[in-house]
Amino acid sequence: MKRSKVLMALLLGIMILATTATAFAATIQEQRQETRQKVAQTLNKLYERKPSARTALKNAEGYAVFASSGVKLGILGASHGRGLAHNNKTGEEIFMRMKEYQAGLGLGAKEYALIFAFIDKTAWDTFTSSDWSFGGQADVTADDGVNGGSFEGAVQAAPGIFVYQMTTKGLAVELSLKGTNYYRDKKLNSVKN
């Protein structure tokens, strides 16, 4: 019992340090630009690994890209990340954040990227208008059934929402988003700089 409390405190300390270091390291404009650069790099890697993703994302209502990192110590784990949602129809950009908490045995750290594709306006609105949480199973799929666009290598996370998950080794076969919350970054979306 005492050991798990120590592990939890250590995990929370690491997460707080990582979050605060990023928050104070740059101005809002610099953080926005850094996020845009990470999005561009992530999309380029996805297109190299899965060329059909370029057309699939281009034909979607919009997409969101998250760069995330996670830590797992003992029975507790957590991930956090920043991202950007882009609406292909309107050009709107929404800066976002994500948090994930998990339980289960494990030890280690990983960096990964998640790329969401929104098939229609309803899926876009559902994801970007409020906190969106994922807590269920994801099914592997290759076709959106609506636009005829191929989402080969993506997983359907919800109606109209497909997700590519990339690790440093390539595209992941499964999607592990259980207990993950996605929400607007109030600071980076503020009008003031």
Image (spheres, rainbow, N blue to C red):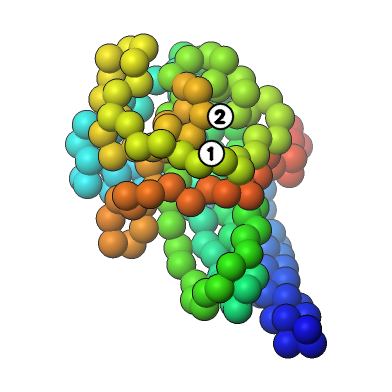
Pointer 1 or 2: first along the chain: 1
Image-quadrant location for residue 52: top left
124 or 134, nearer to the observer: 134
Q: Residue at x 62, y 73 (%)?
A: 75
**Is residue 122 left or right of 15 when viewed as pictured?**
left
**Is residue 46 left or right of 118 when viewed as pictured?**
left
Q: Badge 2: few (under 14), some or many (20 or more) residues near its Cα, within 10 Å?
A: some
Q: Residue at x 62, y 60 (%)?
A: 102
The percent position of residue 40, horizontal first and vertical second, equals 38, 43
Residue pointed to by mark 1: 84
Image-quadrant location for residue 122: top right
43 or 91, nearer to the observer: 43
> Would you place residue 52 above or below residue 21 in this image?
above
12 or 175, nearer to the observer: 175
Q: Badge 1: few (under 14), some or many (20 or more) residues near its Cα, within 10 Å?
A: many
The percent position of residue 59, horizontal first and vertical second, equals 34, 18
**Is residue 130 left or right of 145 when viewed as pictured?**
right
Q: Are marks 1 and 2 in contact (CB under 8 Å)?
A: yes
Image-quadrant location for residue 135: top right
The percent position of residue 159, horizontal first and vertical second, equals 50, 23
Q: Amino acid at mark 2?
A: Glu
The percent position of residue 189, horizontal first and vertical second, equals 69, 36
CA separation in Å, label 1 and label 2: 7 Å
Q: Amino acid at mark 1?
A: Leu
Residue pointed to by mark 2: 93
